[in-house]
Amino acid sequence: MSSNYSVNIKCSFPVIEFMVNRYGPQPIAFPKKDRFNTMICFALQKPPADYKGEPDYGKETLQIMLPFMEYKNVDSWNYLSPIAQADIASKMKAFLKAEFHSFMDDAKNNGFSQVSACYMFMEQNDISPVAFDMFKRERNRYLQRIRERRHRHKKTSVRRSVCPDAHS
């Protein structure tokens, strides 16, 4: 259950569109057992003395409803520091990337091309087509990291079997 208080977090536009599609319109009210709800509850602080209200980041503003908490009163604990906001935004971006790569792996296993699967993910999550290049680059970076990890693993496993005393 959410309170009447909300906080603004600066996020990239595709992350905002993804979160709105996943959790509902802004201000987003996360479910009680959701990990983002737990992170927000943990990161909430009392506002500093010179606090002037929630900043507006324009199109990069994601508005989140604060939950009622058992151990903190929302009337006085309704401030997220810039560091906490950045950390929560990075966790949201990581969540988007994890969902994206999971979707792309399933699409590849079902025979779809990378381009068509990328467009399908964006359409399914109501993300504007402007973000296509970002998703395509992210997928290529991810695949490159996987290749490098496999290559490093091969090199160390071959060296261990040929020269077992080299790592002693």
Image: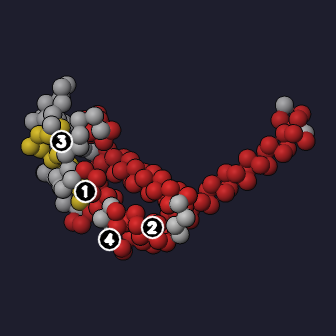
Q: Quadrant of the C terminus?
A: top right
Alpha-carbon neighbours of circle 3 within 10 Å: few (<14), some, or many (≥20)? many
Residue extending farthest front = 110
- The residue sitting at 40% across, 67% down in the picture is 120
Residue at image location 45% in from the left, 67% down from the top: 118
Residue 119 drawn at (x, y percent): 41, 70
Q: What element carries label 3?
A: strand
Mark 3 or mark 1: which comes first in sequence?
Answer: 1
Circle 1 Cα neighbour tier, 10 Å, few/some/many (<14 / 14–19 / ≥20): some
Describe residue 155's horizontal placement relative to residue 131 as left or right: right
Q: Earlier in the sequence, mark 2 or mark 4?
A: 2
How much space separates mark 2 and mark 3, taking CA atoms?
A: 33 Å
Label 2 vs label 1: CA separation? 19 Å
According to the image, label 4 marks what residue? 128
Q: Which of marks 2 and 3 is in front?
A: 2
Q: Which residue bears the numbered disc 1?
A: 20
Q: Where does label 3 land, which residue? A: 66
Residue 115 position in % (x across, y down): 49, 72
Q: Is residue 140 visible?
A: yes
Marked residue nearer the N-terminal end (4 or 3):
3
Asked if labels 4 and 2 touch by Cβ distance under 8 angstroms, the answer is no
